[in-house]
Amino acid sequence: MRTVDRSERIRTYNYPENRISDHRTGYKSYNLDAVLDGDLGPVVQSAVEADEAARMADVGQGA
């Protein structure tokens, strides 16, 4: 069984603080209970915005 180093984590769920953090996009919110109930809109939106920013950066570099 492999352990996951902190730098390899995609998301952290902190139940005592009711916090969710997406390490790829920089998203952090204190609404973990809502996310677990299915309110994924803000999490998905952060992924969409991160993808768009990466694509725009690639275009700016001529890729």
Image: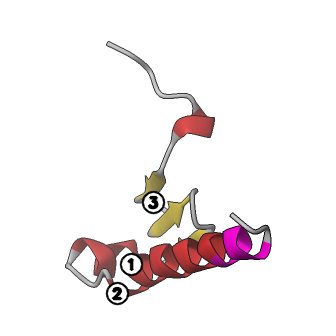
Q: Quadrant of the N terminus?
A: top left
Which region shows up in magenta?
A: 56-60
Q: CA distance from mark 3 to mark 1?
A: 23 Å
| Residue that lies at the very extreme toward the left in this rendered image | 37
Residue under pointer 1: 44
Q: CA distance from mark 1 to mark 2?
A: 5 Å
Residue kind at label 2, given as amino acid type: Gly
Residue underneath mark 2: 41
Tell me if 62 is positioned left or right of 7 in this view: right
Mark 3 belongs to which amino acid?
Answer: Pro
Above or below, comparing residue 2 to residue 23 in the picture: above
Q: Nearer the viewer, mark 2 or mark 3?
A: 2
x 68%, y 63%: residue: 63
Residue 18: say if magenta.
Answer: no
Residue depth check, mark 3 versus mark 1: number of the one nearer the observer: 1
Query: Would residue 31 be visible to someone looking at this image?
Result: no
Among numbered discs 3 and 1, the one appearing first in the sequence = 3
Q: Is residue 21 visible?
A: yes
* Label 3 sits on residue: 16
Would residue 60 appear left or right of 16 to someone viewing this image?
right
